Amino acid sequence: MNDEPRCSWFYLAGIVLTALLIAGGATALALPPVCDVGAGEDVGCARGFETRERDGYGSFRWTDGDAGVVLSAAGYGAPHLVEIVMAAPRPPDVSPPSTTLSVAATSIMITPPAAPRRYRLLHPPDFPAGETIRIAIQSETWKPDGDRRNLGVLVYLVRVRLLGDPVLPPLQHTLAILAIGLAASFAGRHPLIRTSIALGAIGVCGVLWVWFPMRTTPFLPFYALLLGSATILFAWLKRREPARQPVWFGEPVVLAAIGGVLLDALIVTGVTRGSWVVPVIGAQATLAVWGVWRADRRSWSLPDLLRIALIVRLLALTTRLLSGEIGSDPDVELFYNYGRATLELGLPVVEYPSGALIPWALMALPASRELFALALPLCNTAADLLIVWGIWQIGFQRRAVTGEGTGAAALACFYALSSLLLPFWHGKYDSLPTALLALGLVAFAHRRMGWSGVALGIGGALKWTPWLAAPVLAFGIARLRSSRSFTSLWAFAAGGMIAVAVTSIPFALIDWERFLAPYTLQGGRAITGESLWFLVFLVIAPEHWSRLPAPWGAFETGRGFVGVAVAVQGATLAGLMLNALRPALSEWRLIALAALTPAIFLLLNRVFSPQYILTITAAALIASAAVGDSPRVVRNLVLLLTITQAANLLVWPNTVPWWPLASAVMFITAASALGWIVAGATRQSTAHFHRHGKGADL
């Protein structure tokens, strides 16, 4: 508006008018709101139900005594008739439950029979009925033998029938598609291009509203709020940075990011199955490498990198919502159950550190599996943005201090746009402890020792690996042997111990044996098929090729082989940690060692999970940024890590019959990438010795 105020106001008026027309047309053309409870689309409308099931009548879910259904975007102008199909099967010795149905100010008391029955309630079209209709279902519960659940009634279907034609669209959703269009317009350069992008985004929202009303309308206000807030945040960050060439829609990096998500959608929606998954994953890898290689020499700003990361994850979230695959990972249900058990019992028996129960309990507070399935990828999105910021910040700080290192932006760009990590963003929680690892290393680079200890302490309480970076940093501080280093060491140690105490002691006070359960359970686990040591065992004992387990299955090898695996892992980690005591070790080399220690631990662990690749990738990128690798080295590192990520997806979740070969490729390329970083740092350290006339130390 500063350049062409009159034209800009004209374009804005056109965008507003288009949003009104699209919302009105979509309200008239879309089917009335319906919630098929138990189907994939119920994540936008069901609240407080048990897991999905199916019988001869259709899909359904049990209530747990207090559940609800939310129907969005019915519109104004006609009365609403709310229909509910439900049943309450009980054994002969259990009486039918008394159930209360509530819609707005209307409540009725019923006793549903064992067979499905339809109930209808009239709802006036007053505000805010055209925006959202909330149906509350409260009932008595019973607990079947051998079942941990308290079961209320079965709900099959909830729908709205309009007794007439809607006249006005819902205000909230009209403003939502307008806000989405305005946020999308910032991807263009000139007012005309921005207007075209805004109109296109509004049009897409309208099409999805008509074709997939229950998979679109519940989330439009959320997307509007998120995109609007992100746009304001990025604009604020951009004003705080030097002027750089912005990233526009048609650039290779943006096309690679969007193309990777679209290919991921082919796998998520089931369009590509079986052996066809391999070329799709190969195409994703090719796009990631092409996008980074084409953009590794351009001038990047932090808002542009964060914008790319957010676009990739929001598009991935959209494809999962539209396909009904949100929360499809079994671990999502597991994490929700752990969160609810924490709220109800205080400390359940889990195989994860007790600190992980804190975020799960917070996300499970609404007592809704559906909201938890949405909250988990959103939490991981925030963590991924923090990881991108951490990689960029390490490289920026190193360049500001030493004047070396120009490839850190490309490293952050790779993590931001790689669609090969999306399966672990969607259904796991490794992004959160990895983000705290990155935050701790950034704080150390800025000499905020206390905060560095706090971040690593909290990260380790969530998932042990960030703790492994702490001894490396502590040894690096202690080797200086000065009064200032002594103060820094105490601040670092105090911050870490306070963080661990706050996140762990409350659970230890509840039940000491349950608090120690994760450590005893993990300590007794056998080698898994996904680990490096399984491949080593196959080389030693080739006869085991004929009886391969599932990749995630345990594989008994005897205690002697397990002892060798643990000894090699321990010796490697000890070497990395003792290397931090070298007198001539630079601060940036120390940060690189601290980042590599958790990555190498995971790579050599006898219990390996595919989601570890997310932490290994982030740690490798942070270490490379700290070392200050050249653009040529960065390109090679990106290629190795891309092959690692692609091969990892062929082990899980897209397991191929020849998965041991894919696993071998993954470990070879991952080890090569980590070794490349170590070798580069060693060459730099050797050059330092020769430049200052010093001999190499032990």
Image: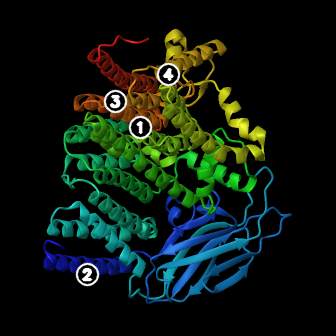
- Marks 1 and 3, how far apart at CA: 14 Å
Query: Mark 2 or mark 3, which is nearer the start of the sequence?
Result: 2
Residue type at tag 3: Val
Are discs 1 and 4 less than 8 Å apart at CB?
Answer: no
- Amino acid carrying label 4: it is Leu
Which of label 1 and label 3 is nearer to you?
3
Q: Quadrant of the N terminus?
A: bottom left
What is the CA distance from the residue labelled 4 to the residue labelled 3? 27 Å
**Mark 4 burial class by Cα count in 10 Å: few <14, some 14-19, many 20+:** many
Q: Which residue is mark 2?
A: 17
Give residue 353's quadrant in the image.
Answer: top right
Residue 532's disc number: 4
Give the secondary structure at mark 1: helix
Q: Amino acid at mark 1?
A: Ala
**Where 31 sits versus 334, above or below?**
below
Residue at x 53%, y 78% (from the top left corner): 133
Q: Secondary structure at mark 4?
A: helix
Q: Are marks 4 and 3 in contact (CB under 8 Å)?
A: no
Q: Are marks 3 and 2 in contact (CB under 8 Å)?
A: no
- Where does residue 418 sit, x and y in percent of width and height? 34, 42
Report the front residue among 46 and 363. 363
| Residue picked out by circle 3 | 627
Q: Is residue 403 above or below residue 313?
A: above
Q: CA distance from mark 4 to mark 2?
A: 60 Å
Residue appearing at x 33%, y 68% in the figure: 180
Q: Which residue is mark 1?
A: 618
Q: Rounded to the nearest whole Å, what is the CA distance between mark 3 and mark 2?
A: 53 Å
Tag 1–tag 2 contact (CB < 8 Å):
no
* Mark nearer the N terminus (4 vs 2): 2
